[in-house]
Image (tube, rainbow, N blue to C red):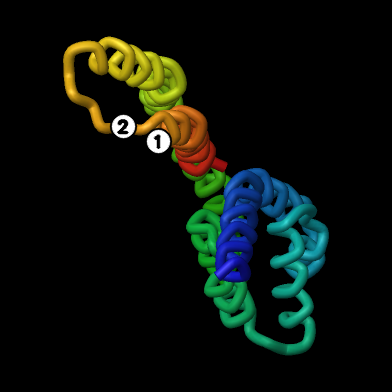
Amino acid sequence: MISLLAEKIKRFKEEKALDSETASCLLLVHALLVSGESFERVLESVPGAAGERLKRAALRIRKGEKAHESLAQEKNNSPSEYFSRACDELARTYYTGTSENLAALAKNISRERQNKVKEYNSKMIMYSLFFVVSAAVLPAMFESFLIIGSSFMDISISPEQAFLITVVGFPALSAFSVLLAIIKRPG
């Protein structure tokens, strides 16, 4: 179970890294292709996580594998939707010889990422409110309910239960709200 969780976290981090690099990677490839570099050399010169994947594809192309098959293999192994789209466009670029669509795709990906960041910022207000409620409001209301409610209501919560709810339950809820904000953060 822990190995599955570790694998999911690894893929999640890899996806975020690829998402953040793909647009700049495409612009670099476009610029190098316009300057006259060979396709394989351009793929080998891309830095970062995207560059590692493109270097593997370039190596297979040099060994005789077709470009679209090599890039499709990297696309299928990629957790990133943006990198998958980039691989499709790179394969088209290899066969058509024009790299103008790479720049257009890079702009499109940048725009989509910008929209995701704006959407996240608007959701962040709700995550912050959830954190404040779980960290301050709910524990205070619970404690006041225990104190005031016990004076005129028959409450059957033991001191150990109240202690566990206050010391474990509410901090766990607060930690969950922070984790939720981190997981939903765009790459």
Residue 87 in percent (x, y) is at 57, 65
| Location of residue 143 by image quarter | top left
Q: Is residue 32 above or below residue 144?
A: below
Q: Is residue 76 above or below residue 36?
A: below
Callout 2 amino acid: Ile
Callout 1 amino acid: Gln
Task: Please rate how many residues cluster around mark 2, counting C-alpha atoms within 10 Å: few if below 14, some from 14 to 19, many from 20.
Answer: few
Looking at the picture, tell me which residue is in the foreground, 180 or 52: 180
Looking at the picture, tell me which residue is in the foreground, 70 or 7: 7
Write down the residue under mark 1.
161
Name of the residue lying farthest toward the bottom: 64
Looking at the picture, tell me which residue is in the foreground, 45 or 143: 143
Residue at 31 percent of width and 32 percent of height = 157
Q: Dividing the image into 4 quarters, which one contains the N terminus?
A: bottom right
Element marked by disc 1: helix
Q: Are marks 2 and 1 in contact (CB under 8 Å)?
A: yes
Is residue 148 visible in the rendered structure shown here?
A: yes
Residue at 49 percent of width and 36 percent of height = 168
Residue at 55 percent of width and 76 percent of height = 72
Write down the residue under mark 2.
157
Residue at 70 percent of width and 74 percent of height = 57
